[in-house]
Image: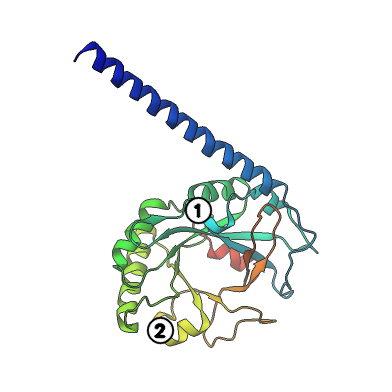
Amino acid sequence: MSSRRKKKLLRWILIITVAGLVALVSVLARRWWMYQQAKSTRYAEFGISIPGEYAIHGIDVSRYQDIIAWEEVKAMSVHNIRMGFAFIKATEGIGSADPQFRRNWKKSRSHDVVRGAYHFFIASKDGKMQAENFIKRVDIEPGDLPPVLDVEQRNGVSAAQLRKEVRKWLSTVELHYGVKPIIYTNVDFYEQNLGSEFDSYPLWVAHYYEDEQPRIKRDWIFWQHNDQGRVNGIMPKVDFNVFKGDSIAFRAMLVR
C-alpha cells in the first residue's frame, strides 16, 4: 500500500474513532441527564386512588418510563403505602428486547425492589421462538417473581392459533426456569380468547378504575388497577398493581 493510501486510511480511521467516541459520550451524557431528572422527580401523592384493602403494591415499567431512579421508587411512602414489587418488560416477539431492561433489571434488585420480567407476546409469531428470546435475555434468580407472558392481542390470527402459540411459550419457559409462568392480560381478552384452558396458571389481570377488585370469574393474584399513577424517580405516568394476599403469600410466590 502506498504512503498516500496509508495516510488516507489512517485519516478515515481517526475520523471514525472520534465520531464513535463523540456518539458514546453523547449517549452517556444523555443517560446521566435523564437519571438526574428522574432522581429529582417528586410527587406528594401517587396521583390516583389506591385500593386500600391490599397490603402489597407495585408498578410495571418498560422503555416508556425512560431512565428510572430506583432508589427514589423504593423510598417513596404515602400513608404507609410503598412500591413492593415491579414487573419489568424484557422482550417482545422473536428478537426484540426492551432497551431499558438490563438497567431496570439490575437497578431494581440493587435497591431491594422485588422484580419480575415479562414478555410481550406477538400472536402471529412462533411461541417457542418467542420463549427462547425471553430465556436468552432473562436470568431469573431466587427472590424474583415468576416469568410473565403479556398476551393481549390476536394480531390477526384465530383464537385457536393464539392458544397454540401461547401453550408453546408457557411450556418452554416453565421447562427452562422450573416455575409456572404468570399470564398477564385484560378481563375481556382472557374470557374471549384464553378461557378455562389456562385457568391453572397464575393470573395478573388488567381492569382499570374498579374500586375494589377486577370483575373476572376466575381467581387472580395480581391486579393492574390504574395506568395513570405517579411515583418518585419516574417522570412519565406508570401502571399501578396490587397483590392479592399478605406478605407470607407474596414470599411464597417468589422463585426459590
Determine whether 130 is above or below 165 in the image.
above
Image location of residue 144, percent across then percent down:
52, 56
Determine whether 83 is above or below 202 in the image.
above
What is the three-letter code of the residue carrying label 1? Pro
CA distance separating discs 1 and 2: 32 Å
**Residue farthest toward the front in the current orientation of the protein:** 4
Q: Secondary structure at mark 2?
A: helix
Image location of residue 249, percent across then percent down:
60, 68
Image location of residue 118, percent across then percent down:
47, 62
Q: Residue at x 35, y 20 (%)?
A: 11
Residue 47, by quadrant, is bottom right
Q: Between residue 246 and residue 100, name the one nearer to us.
A: 100
Q: Between residue 107 and residue 23, name the one nearer to us.
A: 23
**Left or right: 65 with respect to 231?**
left
Residue for badge 1: 142
Task: Tell me which label, 1 or 2, sits earlier in the chain.
Answer: 1
Residue for badge 2: 193
**Left or right: 21 with respect to 46?**
left
**Residue farthest toward the left in the current orientation of the protein:** 1
Determine whether 5 is above or below 246 in the image.
above
